[in-house]
Image: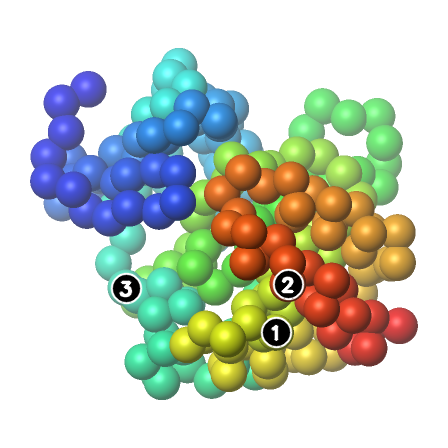
Amino acid sequence: MTTGRLFGSGRSADVYEIDEAWVLRRDREGWGDAAAEGEVMTYVRSHGYPAPRVRPSTSRTDLVMERLSGPTMLGALLEGSLAPAEAGTEIARLLRQLHAIPARDTAAPASRVLHLDLHPDNVILTPAGPRVIDWPNTENGAPGLDWAMSAVILAQVAVSDTETAAPARTMPTALLADPTPLTPETLKEARTRRAANPTMTPRETELLGEAEDLIRTLAF
């Protein structure tokens, strides 16, 4: 597909402008399956979940999706227009809303659609409300794993020495303020999965032990 100007870049994908309504997200590394990801986004949207609209696709690398206006939640945190506690509470709300949706094509009644990468840089704060983006890791499973993944990602930043560490320290507390399905077992699995993420830097991997310790003090 012919692309317009580069709209933005992440760790493994680039986003290009198509027109005022649509953008193209192109996977640089070839790790995901854009067609399968788009199907999940369409499915959760059909249940009222705030994912962007997507066009049907047969491509593994290219996904045409709704062009969203507004900052990421991370951007709003850094500029001071969103409080860290409010961000953590909103991530929790988005997880609860997602886990109210039954999983697709599964015989396990307790199984749900999992995002597995729900954090402030994957939430766009549009005028119509938040929109959750980047679904390449999605799968069916136990909600506790989704909570654990989000908690690990937030805690990993909270124990770092980056500019986002200060706001991130409040967010795991807000995320885990209410009883959640997170368990020691799902936390262990989340740490293992996070360590295996090929986009992680060596320093980020080193922080996983401290991140897990922080979560344990908050959740158990």
Closest to the observer, 29 or 117: 29
Q: In the rendered structure, which amino acid carries the disc numbered 1? A: Val
Residues tagged 2 and 1 counted as in contact (Cβ below 8 A): yes
Dot 2 alpha-carbon crowd within 10 angstroms: few under 14, some 14 to 19, many 20 or more: some
Residue at figure coordinates x 82%, y 52% from the top left = 188
Relative depth, front residue between 48 and 76: 76
- Give the residue drawn at x 69%, y 67%: 211
Q: Is residue 2 visible?
A: yes
Query: What quarter of the picture does the C terminus occupy?
Result: bottom right
Give the distance between the C-alpha atoms of the residues marked 1 and 3, in whole angstroms: 28 Å
Q: Which residue is mark 2?
A: 207
Disc 1 secondary structure class = loop
**Hey, what amino acid is under mark 3?**
Gly
Residues at discs 3 and 2 in contact (Cβ within 8 Å): no
Q: Residue at x 25, y 58 (%)?
A: 69
Badge 3: how crowded within 10 Å, few (<14), some, or many (20+)? some
Give the quadrant of residue 205.
bottom right
**Residue 152 seen in this snapshot:** no
- Mark toward the viewer: 3 or 2: 2
Q: Nearer the viewer, residue 10 or 144?
A: 10
Please determine whether, in this image, residue 147 is positioned above or below residue 11: below
Name the residue beneath numbered marker 1: 159
Left or right: 65, with 201 as reference point = left
On the rendered structure, is 216 left or right of 151?
right
Which sits earlier in the primary sequence, circle 3 or circle 2?
3
Element under disc 3? loop
Tag 1: Cα neighbours inside 10 Å, few (<14), some, or many (≥20)? many
Whether residue 91 sits left or right of residue 25 in the image: it is: right
Q: Quadrant of residue 125?
A: bottom left
Residue designated by label 3: 70
Q: Position of residue 14 (x, y in %)?
A: 28, 39
Which residue corresponds to the image point at 78% horizontal and 70% vertical from the top-left?
Answer: 213
